[in-house]
Amino acid sequence: MPSWDEFQPFIVTGLALGGVYALSGVGMVVLYQTTGVLNLAFGAVGAMGALISWQLINEAGWPDWPAYLVCIGFGAVVTLVYGVVFGPPLAGRDPLIKATATLGLALILLGAMSWIWSDKARSLDLPTTQEEAFEVGTIFVNWTQVIALALGVVVTAWTTAFLRFTKLGAAMRALATDREITATLGVPVRRVEASAWLVSGLLSGVSGLLLSNLVGLDATTLTFLVISSLAAALIARLRSLGVTLLAGLAVGVVNALATPINSISEYRDMAPFVLATIALLWLSRRREISFARAGGSL
Amino acid sequence: MSAAGAHGVAPSWWSPGRLDQRTRIQLVVIAALLAFTLFALPARMSAYWTDVATAVAIFSVVSLGLATLMGRVGLVSLGQISVLALGAWVAARLAFATSLPFPVVLIAAGLITMVLGTLVGLPALRLSGLYLALITLMLAGAIGVVLASTDFPNGAGGFLGHSESSFGNPGVRRPSIATSDSAYFRYTIVVSALMFLLALVHVRAKPGRAWAAIRQSEPAALAAGVNITLYKIWAFALASFMTGVAGGLLAGSVGHLFTTQFPTSQNIVLLAVVLMGGIYSLWGAVVAGMLIKLLPALLDNWGLPADLLTILFGVGVLQVLTTAPAGLVAQVPRDLGRLGSALAGLVRGGRGPEHGAATSEEPAAPAGRERPPPVSQRGAE
């Protein structure tokens, strides 16, 4: 068993990664609550945005920051367009079908990415990674890690406040309860849903950018990292933003802490799956999980 | 079957006296197709295409498992390729460790996979719909992580049966009656046909009716006295068994198994092709097998990148879910029918294509039991 000193750096890595998981988890939960769509293409959108940024910086010679903005913008636009085009026709269907449909988008993006950028090793280094922010004890912390954790916390807090105190937030919460009744109350349902898609898309772009830096710029890896953030969202039962944040941090830290322990190091990437599975089964022991609406068939 | 025989009543799925013309035609077509694939096809195919055809047959069985879960019971599994990998692992391990006859290895692989699949399914069945699908996705990820470090057996000793030094070993053995590629292709076709028969038996008999009831409405099925948990587990067990057998076939087909043959993304691709093929018809599974294995080979042959297919499958998923829930199997005949009437309308010079197309709307729906359930509307409970 490694000593405490050996664990310390991994706590920093874990918290940074957990912050991004929380960020993506919040993006998915807000969208799911508002539209009933669990966006499984969340990771793919972010991955493609990050690859486009890489292309702009390394091939087209763009300066860094506009390229990063393009990444975030790409996430927002693709997600919004998908939501506007496919949201309404599928609005009355089962959540399972809505989630399955987003897998279609994931496949399209995945195919496009591996077609345009073949599986060559790439890296996207944010300028914030090179600068050392400060030291905690003997551990170096870089700015990207600080930003990742801070964004996770800030976005969670901001979204919670937004849902609670603004008119649009109230409309979103109403939609989460019942779409039809909300519509009869005079809420412009499609516009509210579109804004949820937009916010979720922005978050997917930001997390794609951060993850490509913290984990690596690889289309498949980034696409399926969505499972880890999904784990955080699932532990929160796709409902509570605060729990999503804590679960995201927990998943990230457990994942990272397993790294220095040789016997389980190889299996550390199972952390999100194991945690989420245990949490789901525990939560469903009295069938407390919210069930899909009637007619679960495809 | 034996129970039905004891009462002197033919089981409901086998009643030759009541075969209507449509069924008879179908039987003749199936027999002709099987005869063609078994006797005429192998001699006409190069080694490459024999491999491709074998893979198509194997993946038809995998698709059949998933299509049964989705179309018959309404459960979505996003981890079937991982189950396939599990089946292949078990079959390879058994084939290296024992000298059991190949059919026994296949059945054992199927049964062990079935037990594992059911164990996973047992707690997960308390969840429903979306959550069950997500759990299977997580488990697929977990199996992927485990396989990445254990790797597939390659003839070494120990429980895992894998070592870096054993790479020169011969691959998983094939049955003694089917060592050549074309013989193994025939063998695969026969086993796959048996799996389809197994699925058909289930669909036509009591489990099929129970599944249909569950798919329509769980509360109604419960009220009608259907043991929901039993039949859901049954469906999981059946799908895992078929996928496990397919894994065994795959192990024998490729000989040397690698984790790169089972990427996580393939789980999603499988879901896409099964949806595109059509989940309400057994033929859909055959179409799905072709989509996932034959199309990439064709594209490769034409020098086109296989990534185009991934994009196409993504578009296919969106198209199927928004417009054609019964998949290609139902859509192509319907659209051809529409086209036919439109052309006929043009030739007659009557009211034009619109009129013809409108009248062909009704026969479009697939006949009888194959008809998909009505699209569930929000608040229709």
Image (cartoon, coloured by chain):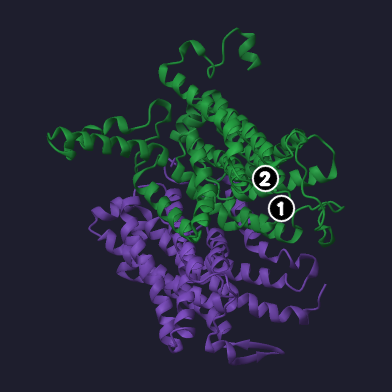
Tell which residue pokes out farthest to the right in this image.
Answer: B157
- Of B268 and B343, the residue lying toward us: B343
A145 relative to B263, above or below: below
The residue positioned 59% from the left and 53% from the top of the image is A280
Point out residue B154 in the picture as x, y percentages from the top left corner. Answer: 79, 53
- Of B329 and A178, the residue lying toward us: B329
Q: Which mark is residue B293?
A: none
Q: Quadrant of the N terminus of chain A?
A: bottom right
What amino acid is labelled 1 in the image? Answer: Leu
What amino acid is labelled 2 in the image? Answer: Leu
The residue pinned by badge 1 equals B257
Point out residue A189 in the picture as x, y percentages from the top left corner. Answer: 28, 59
Q: Is residue A192 visible?
A: yes
The residue pinned by badge 2 equals B250
Find the distance from the CA under tag 1 to the CA under tag 2.
Answer: 9 Å
B371 relative to A286, above or below: above
Point out residue B99 in the picture as x, y percentages from the top left corner. Answer: 85, 38
**Marks 1 & 2 on one chain:** yes
Q: Identify the subunit bearing mark 2.
A: B
The residue positioned 41% from the left and 51% from the top of the image is B316
Q: Indicate the chain coloured purple by its letter.
A: A
Tell which residue pokes out farthest to the top in this image.
Answer: B8
Q: Decide if residue B375 is on the left or right side of residue B360.
A: right
Q: Decide if residue B168 is on the left or right side of residue A86.
A: right
Give SS at disc 1. Answer: loop
Q: Identify the subunit bearing mark 1.
A: B
Q: Are marks 1 and 2 in contact (CB under 8 Å)?
A: yes
The picture's colour for chain B is green
Question: Quick one: label 1, few (<14), some, or many (20+) residues within 10 Å?
Answer: many
